[in-house]
Image (cartoon, helix red, strand yellow):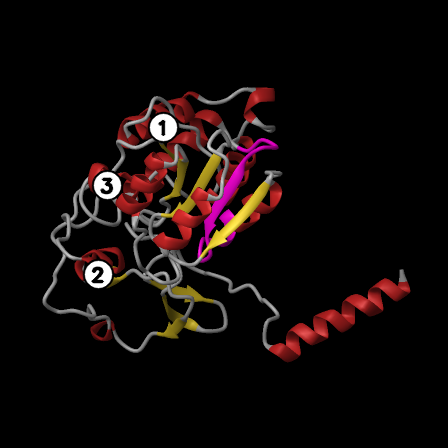
Amino acid sequence: MTALREEIATELGSLRDAGTYKRFNTLESPQGPVVEMAGRGEVIVLSSNNYLGLADHPDVVAAGIEGLQRYGAGTASVRFICGTFAPHLELERELATLSETEAALTYVSCWNANEAAVPTLTDEHTVIISDELNHASIIDAVRLARPERKVRYAHSDMGELRDALRACDRNQRKLVITDGVFSMEGDLAKLPDILELARAHEATVVVDDSHGVGAVGGPVAESPSTSASSARSTSSPARSARRWAGPPAATSHRQRRCATCWRNGRARSSSRTRFRRRSRAALQPPCASFAPGPTSW
């Protein structure tokens, strides 16, 4: 045990020296564009997925309180052992309607959803073909799966994707996995092209649209993951039940990116940087020519 402690201490020291040792930031206020952070005061948050501002919305908070009062703090086990609550089923029915699917299944996070969906869809003859810039949750899900082969293609490179599909046996199960919106880069998957290739090679497309549903484009039928939904495709659950409450459909790639990042003139970004607040006036949209429309709840 002493040797193990010494090895771990050395490894932790290396992380500190490299500047990669992670420390938790403690929030002293609800999540939002500007928060109170212990030891830092008022801070602008540019790393949250709270695109629609629902984390501290009064209606959401009130519904949470009502749920706690009526159902308590949980089932005290997983749902298939101790049962599930009626609101879970109602939520899943509404999500299925929103996504235009037969059914929906909710998880506590998209990380859990991906780690459940990808291995479940995989058998020993499957080939998984994944974009190289997919989210870490997808990467972990692919690691957990046990397919015959795993292929990674260059980001949004349709030529490499085509070659990977051509290399598969026609009767093999082929899963093409991609983000709908790549959260770190901010660009959109080339889903019409991906779906066209999937049709030609009888592949299944799995889309993680956590950063797209309700935040990019118009209603869900116009969101990136469903822009060409007539193909054989599967969409894994988003990180939260995001109802459409964002800006109207944008007409250009640049506008769609702004629609993702801005709501009511406030910053919404997937950047992993935080800046100390100087003034709210500093929060100006990057392209003043595009102003999102009003939101509705």
Tell me the SS state at disc 2.
Answer: helix
Q: Dot 2, crowdedness within 10 Å: few (<14), some or many (≥20)?
A: many
Name the residue at 31% across, 40% down.
195
Observer-side mark, 2 or 3, equals: 3
Residue position marked by numbered label 3 in the rendering: 227
Q: Amino acid at mark 3?
A: Ser
Whether residue 237 appears in this view of the structure is no
Q: Amino acid at mark 1?
A: Leu
Q: Earlier in the sequence, mark 3 or mark 1?
A: 1
Observer-side mark, 3 or 1, equals: 3
* Distance from the alpha carbon under mark 2 to that under mark 3: 18 Å
Q: Amino acid at mark 2?
A: Cys
Name the residue at 36% across, 63% down.
185
- Residue 134 painted magenta: yes
Indicate which disc residue 91 carries.
1
Rendered location of residue 7, percent (x, y):
81, 68
Report which quarter residue 230 is drawn in.
Answer: top left
Q: Dot 1, crowdedness within 10 Å: few (<14), some or many (≥20)?
A: some
Residue position marked by numbered label 2 in the rendering: 258
Whether residue 74 appears in this view of the structure is yes
Rendered location of residue 258, percent (x, y):
21, 61
Q: Which residues are magenta?
A: 122-138
Name the residue at 56% across, 46% down.
150
Residue 12 lies, with reference to residue 152, above or below; the image says: below
Can you say which quadrant of the picture contains the C terminus? top left
